């Protein structure tokens, strides 16, 4: 996916790029010397850095994290909103398995009772909730991955990279779910209780009046139980699958691959990671749907109604399809955004232990 300098300039906000002021503050360690002509190939970072319009986004600078946050908003907000019909059927299958017996019959029941518009009920809290979650998930993941790598040191960061992926993604998701939880609670209530509300504008005050503001966080623990294992699997398995694909499937190094091929790898690795994510997080997903649907419901009530086996299997095939596609699309969108703003795609290249010391002379 190639973008000309002019097309990138017109699409990407200028705040994502370093200015002469920030360079003067010492934020330009990774960019080429100022004496290098703009049209010249990048130096120093070489194949790792991707040419951006006029100036590069410096890795791990405030602009870098801002770009990752913006990519996360687009990645999660758009994809979750697009699969609202699948999510709607899944939630109702979890809440009322007698009425919604299967995927096909579930769509039939919704179409008969609510018409075509009913398939997108709850799309506003979905869009806003998962946009906020995506911003925190991807932005803080990149931050914590760098933070924990620095704590471990160059050699240990490479040796224990999987643990760093797991710790970074778990830390990010704790924060992301605090942003998501209130909107998720309203979304589930709107989607599973016909007549409760039309959407977020009337559903939110109705929910608060019924259960108070603390009620919006009633499902935070099950949400963490669903999302933290999901996100740990999502990021760690993605990073590992990307590395394996470049090592055993793609016939040349990542630095020699075209951008469309790199984005194809991102989507494929994301889909594979999504299948694992769905299986690991599904019992907690059933609990979240059950608790947010009924006032005063407990985990014990959910186990009694769904059964222990039902917690692991109810709605699982649909969720595997939904989450696999969702995760693949999220990584594709996220990495496409990174490429568009002049950043490398995620994963596939293990940083050399000496990398940090090699960059230092460039700032002199």
Image (tube, rainbow, N blue to C red):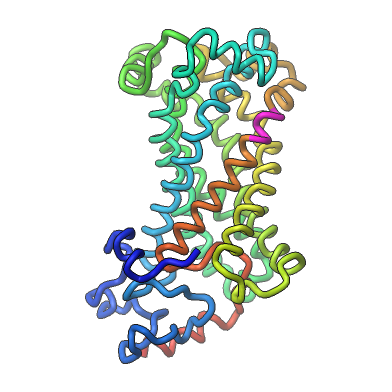
Q: Is 243 in front, or is 172?
A: 243
Is residue 50 placed above or below 192 in the rendered structure?
below
- Image location (x, y in percent) of residue 79: 50, 40
In the image, residue 262 above or below residue 122: below
Compared with 144, 34 (above or below) is below
Q: Is residue 189 left or right of residue 235?
A: left
Foreground pick, 175 / 58: 58
Residue 306 in view of the camera: yes
Q: Residue at x 46, y 45 (%)?
A: 134
Of residues 34 and 5, the one drawn nearer to the viewer in this rendering: 5
Does any portion of residue 182 appear in the rendered image?
no
Quadrant containing the C terminus is bottom left
What residue is rendered at 64% in x and 64% in y?
161
Task: Confirm whether the magenta stretch covers residue 5.
Answer: no
- The residue that appears at 63% across and 17% down in the rendered structure is 93
Q: Position of residue 178 (x, y in %)?
A: 44, 37
Left or right of 137, for residue 314: right
The quadrant in which residue 100 appears is: top right
Measuring from the top left, give residue 171's x and y in whole percent.
52, 50
Q: Is residue 6 above or below residue 105?
A: below
Across the whole image, how many numbered discs are drawn on residues?
A: 0
Q: Position of residue 125 (x, y in %)?
A: 40, 29
Magenta part mainly helix, strand or loop? helix
Q: Quadrant of residue 53?
A: bottom left
Question: What span is colored magenta in the figure?
Answer: 316-321
Q: Residue at coordinates 62% horizontally, 50% vertically from top-left? A: 270
Q: Quadrant of residue 124?
A: top left
């Amino acid at each position: 996916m190639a973008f000309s300098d002019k097309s990138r300039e017109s699409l990407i906000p200028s705040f994502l790029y370093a200015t002469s002021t920030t360079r003067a503050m010492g934020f330009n360690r990774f960019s080429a010397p100022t004496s290098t002509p703009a049209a010249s190939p990048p130096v120093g970072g070489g194949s790792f850095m991707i040419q951006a319009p006029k100036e590069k986004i410096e890795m791990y600078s405030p602009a870098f994290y801002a770009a990752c946050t913006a990519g996360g908003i687009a990645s999660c907000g758009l994809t979750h909103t697009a699969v609202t019909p699948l999510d709607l059927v899944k939630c109702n299958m979890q809440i009322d398995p007698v009425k919604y017996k299967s995927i096909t019959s579930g769509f039939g029941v919704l179409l008969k009772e609510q018409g075509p518009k009913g398939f997108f009920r709850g799309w506003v809290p979905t869009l806003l909730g998962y946009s906020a979650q995506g911003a925190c998930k991807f932005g803080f993941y990149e931050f914590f991955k760098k933070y924990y790598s620095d704590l471990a040191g160059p050699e240990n960061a490479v040796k224990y990279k999987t643990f760093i992926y797991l710790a970074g993604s778990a830390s990010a998701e704790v924060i992301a779910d605090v942003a998501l939880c209130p909107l998720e609670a309203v979304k589930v209530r709107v989607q599973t209780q016909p007549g409760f509300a039309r959407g977020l504008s009337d559903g939110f005050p109705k929910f608060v009046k019924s259960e108070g503001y603390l009620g919006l966080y009633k499902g935070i623990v099950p949400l963490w139980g669903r999302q933290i294992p999901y996100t740990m699997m999502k990021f760690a398995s993605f990073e590992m699958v990307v590395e394996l694909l470049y090592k055993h499937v793609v016939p040349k190094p990542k630095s020699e691959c075209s951008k469309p091929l790199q984005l194809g790898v991102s989507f494929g690795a994301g889909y594979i990671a999504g299948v694992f994510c769905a299986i690991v997080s599904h019992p907690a997903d059933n609990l979240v749907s059950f608790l947010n649907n009924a006032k005063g419901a407990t985990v014990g009530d959910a186990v009694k109604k769904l059964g222990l086996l039902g917690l692991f299997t109810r709605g699982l095939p649909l969720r595997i399809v939904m989450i696999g596609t969702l995760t693949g699309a999220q990584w594709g969108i996220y990495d496409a955004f990174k490429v568009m703003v002049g950043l490398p795609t995620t994963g596939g290249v293990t940083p050399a232990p000496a990398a940090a010391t090699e960059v230092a002379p460039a700032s002199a």
